[in-house]
Amino acid sequence: MGLCVGSFLNVVIHRLPKMMEAQWRAECSELIKGVPAEPAPAYNLVKPNSSCPKCGTPIRAWQNVPIVSWLALRGKCAACKTPISARYPAVEALTGLLSVAVAWRYGFSMQMVGGLLFVWALVALTFIDLDTQLLPDDITLPLVWLGLLLNAFGVFVDLRSAVLGGIAGYMLLWSVYWGFRLLANKEGMGYGDFKLLAAICAWFGWQVLPLVVIVSAVSGTIVGSAALVASKRGLDTRIPFGPYLAVGGLVALFWGREAVVRWLGGFPVL
């Protein structure tokens, strides 16, 4: 199931940014011209059907089998032989492995169901951010509300911890953003990062906030610095922070409560 969801996430990663851009263009056109934009052909997560971006040949059902079809086609379009990026099966494999890890960690339970939805959202957000440096509200905001809804029934933490976590996560990066902007007179991160950290802490409580921030900052510093050196880019190069927040979110999902209990001796009662 995780492999199949990973195949669908490839569609989300590719199409959602394009859908957002089309919506922005339509809104700008309406504001400038004062009339609604002309209806565009249907383009969403369902339509049009998948096809080769080079030759336009429709992709058949057997060519959509996760990983296996890519290997069978030897990483090339069946019609025009244009190479197909290895990232497609990589996303499928990553989603499958994370899904198995969640099932192993939580067993058959509501925590497993919630954990699966959580990691699937993180996979989509990670690759969208890497491609476009955007964290779409269409994913981050539902993730916040879903975390609060699940914890209204105590699935991961109590509701009070979840609400305080969402507020604390958002306000922490919001404060960092404005502090950096006032000192450096430029933006250091986007609002999507605030919402993603708020979502993570809404799922697992305010207690995991230090853990998530430390893991995200350390992984971001190490990987980001290595990427800058490898690409020979300047220090002003923008680096997406969403993937590293996602790493922190995965740590919170799999080991967050145990780590906090070990460090603090238990959750303080508020």
Image (cartoon, grey):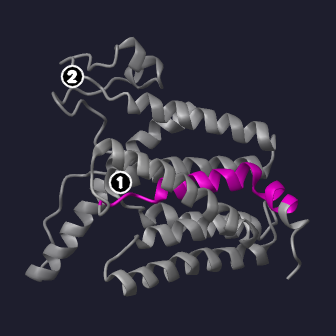
* Quarter residue 183 falls in: bottom left
Checking the image for residue 77, the label placed there is: none
- The prevailing secondary structure element of the residues shown in magenta is helix
Image check: 226 left or right of 231? Answer: right
Relative to 189, residue 222 above or below: above
Relative to 97, residue 82 above or below: above
**Mark closest to the chain's N terminus, 2 or 1:** 1
Q: Residue at x 57, y 63 (%)?
A: 143
**Which quadrant: the C terminus?**
bottom right
Residue that mark 1 sits on: 16
* Magenta highlight range: 237-262
Q: Amino acid at mark 1?
A: Leu
**Which quadrant: the N terminus?**
top right
Q: Residue at x 42, y 61 (%)?
A: 135
Res 1 seen here? no
In front: mark 2 or mark 1? 2
The front one of 102 and 146 is: 102
Where residue 40 appears, as percent x and y from the top left, is 18, 58
**Few, some or many residues within 10 Å of mark 1 (<14, 14–19, 20+):** some
Res 138 seen here? yes
* Quarter residue 14 falls in: top left
Residue that mark 2 sits on: 82
Relative to 97, residue 226 above or below: below
Q: Is residue 14 magenta?
A: no
Q: Amino acid at mark 2?
A: Thr
The front one of 121 and 165 is: 165
Where residue 113 appears, as percent x and y from the top left, is 71, 48
Q: Residue at x 34, y 23 (%)?
A: 60
Q: Residue at x 62, y 33 (%)?
A: 97
SS label for mark 2:
loop
Where residue 18 appears, as percent x and y from the top left, is 27, 54
